[in-house]
Amino acid sequence: MSLTNKNTSRREFLITTTNIFAAVGAACFAWPFIDQMNPSADMLALAKVDFDLSKIAEGQSMTVIWRGKPIFVRHRTAQEIEKANLVKLTELPDPEDDSTRAQKPEYLIVVGICTHLGCVPLGQNPNEPKGEYEGWFCPCHGSQYDTSGRIRKGPAPTNLPVPKYQYISDTVVRIG
């Protein structure tokens, strides 16, 4: 009887040890695949971007790259601000007041990716078409955005998103 107990306990030990080695081996095999899903160092470095607004003249736009996405920064004229404020919210497919989209009315900061299929709309450069509403125009499917980045016409379902940002001085903005 003592021989059976000895064989049973040895068998249980070997099974347990084999299972532990298999679990450690599976973890060592899976770790590189899991680790490669983390953001790369260059993306982590772009988690927050500081941008000096004094570089943009009134009526001009610049593009800043944040987390691999184009961020449109526009120094709006008084006419563009007035035009954006005169729009009736009932006319908009995705109603949003201009004052909620821009912390300071003269500067609009939006993610420059069309909300329809992820294209980059035209309108950042003076020679590019801006559409009927003088904002941005996505030539792929015809979506048109106004001077507040709100969808006005076309298949895009929502406005250009406003990224999280804050003013760290009168002219410097931290995006992210």
Image (cartoon, rainbow, N blue to C red):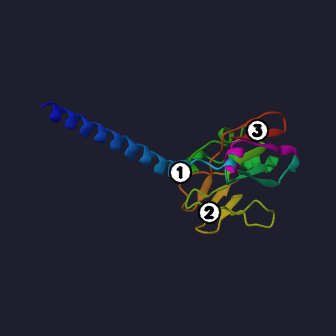
View extreme (top): residue: 2
Q: Quadrant of the N terminus?
A: top left
Relative image position of residue 141 (x, y in whole percent): 58, 68
View extreme (bottom): residue: 140
The residue tagged 1 is: 32
Q: Which stretch appears magenta?
A: 42-54
Specify the amino acid type for callout 3.
Lys
Specify the amino acid type for callout 1.
Pro
Specify the amino acid type for callout 2.
Cys
| Residue at (81, 63) in percent of width and height | 126
Between 18 and 8, the one lying in front of the other is 8
Which badge, 3 or 2, is on the more N-terminal residue? 3
Q: Residues within 10 Å of mark 2 (few under 14, many from 20)?
A: some
| Residue at (64, 50) in percent of width and height | 40
Relative image position of residue 102 (x, y in whole percent): 71, 41
Which badge, 2 or 1, is on the more N-terminal residue? 1
Which badge, 1 or 3, is on the more N-terminal residue? 1
Relative image position of residue 142 (x, y in whole percent): 60, 66
Nearer to us of marks 1 and 3 is 1
Nearer to us of marks 2 and 1 is 1
Label 2 SS: loop
Query: Gap in Å between the C-alphas at discs 1 and 3?
Result: 45 Å
Q: Residues within 10 Å of mark 1 (few under 14, many from 20)?
A: few
Query: Residue 43 in magenta?
Result: yes
Question: Could one spot residue 93 in this view of the protein?
Answer: yes
Q: Quadrant of the C terminus?
A: top right
The residue tagged 2 is: 119
Query: Residue 142 in magenta?
Result: no
